[in-house]
Each structure stands twice: as C-alpha cells, then as structure tokens.
Amino acid sequence: MSDTIKTSDLDKAFKDEVMTEPGAEKLILCFNCTGCTAGCTMAEHEPNYNIRQLLRMANLGMRDELLNHPYLWNCTTCYKCQERCPQGVPNVDILLKIRTMAVHSGIMLDNHRKVAQLMAKTGHAVPINDDNKEKRKKLGMNELPETVHNYPDALEEVHKIVAKTKFDKLTEDQS
C-alpha cells in the first residue's frame, strides 16, 4: 500500500460494491487488531502477505491499487483469519468478492486464467492426459476420475453453463 493516500485515489462506490457481499458491511468494524494476519497460513510462507492490509484498502476504496495488488490471489481460503476475527468480519468472503470484481475487470493471474480456461473447455481444472492417467493407475485408482471425463452428457451441461454465464468470455486471454 502506498505511504501516501490521495483522496482522489479513493473510490467510495468501490467500497460500497465490496460491501454488497452478505456480511461484508462488517468490514467497517475492523480495528486492525492483527488477529487475521497473525494467524494467516499464507503469511507464514510469504512474510509480506497481509490480508489486513488488503481489507483496509477495500475499506478505504482503493479500487485500482487493490484489484492490481500482487497478493490479491495469495489467500488459500483456509478461513483461519475469518474464524479468528473478534468482530466477525468475513475476511475471506470479502477477498473472494474482490477477486470476482478483479476478474470482471479483466484482471487475473495467467495461471488462474489457464486453469479457468481448462475447466471451461474440458469441465475439469486438472488435465487428464496420458501421464496423469498412468499416475492414477499406479495409485490403484480408475484411469479417469468420476467427473465429466466419465460422463460426456455432463460436459455438455458444463458447456451450457459456461456459455450462459459467459465464463469463457471472462477468462479469455487479454492480449
């Protein structure tokens, strides 16, 4: 987060949109106790990761900086921070809302975009190629998981949902 915040960088409409998530109105109750960050699994692996900072940016309405923040996508959604919050702020749910807003703005990490595209195309986020089929057999599992790979009609349904929701348009390459 910038050391200096200019009033012109703040977007109240952004904050209001974030707070349309059920329970997100509690965002304003955060008093920066550090409970969320102190218990964060991700922060143990990435010392600069700070969910409290991301939520503070949302509370201030720092739309552009937050949607493009390098750590926006680091949360593992373990919900530990949310369970620890003494004010009942739905930290993870708010962060997921912000991620959704980023995607709708065309902002998404390349690896996440590739996984989303694979899911939209094949109905499965993990490629089921010959190598993965062999690994599954070695583990004593069926070559194909109990997903759309075994149920072609289900893949048709996935494609209908993807088309109806325009998920494929949200996740197409931005280049």
Image: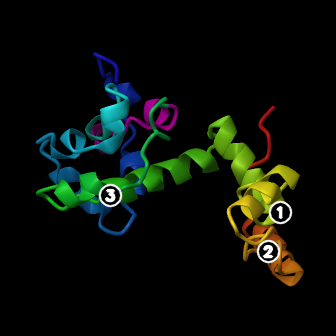
Res. 140 mark: none
Pointer 1 residue: 122
First of labels 1, 3 by sequence position: 3
Specify whether residue 92 is in view: yes
Crowd band around label 3 with a 10 angstrom C-alpha radius: few (<14), some (14–19), many (20+): some
Q: Which residues are magenta?
A: 55-68
Specify few, some or many for label 2: CA neighbours under 10 Å numbering under 14, 14-19, or 20 or more.
some
Give the image location of residue 93, x and y in percent: 38, 59
Of the residues shown, which amino acid type is indicated by label 1?
A: Thr
User: Do the residues under discs 2 and 3 have CB atoms within 8 angstroms?
Assistant: no
Q: Quadrant of the C terminus?
A: top right
Closest to the observer, 97 or 83: 83
Q: Main secondary structure of the magenta part?
A: helix
Query: For the view shown, which residue lies furthest in the top direction?
Result: 3
Q: Amino acid at mark 2?
A: Val
Question: Which numbered mark, 2 or 3, is in the foreground of this view?
Answer: 2
Is 8 placed left or right of 90 in the picture?
right
Residue at (62% x, 50% y) in the render: 104
Residue highlighted by disc 3: 79
Residue ID for mark 2: 148
Which residue is located at x 33 percent, y 25 percent?
48
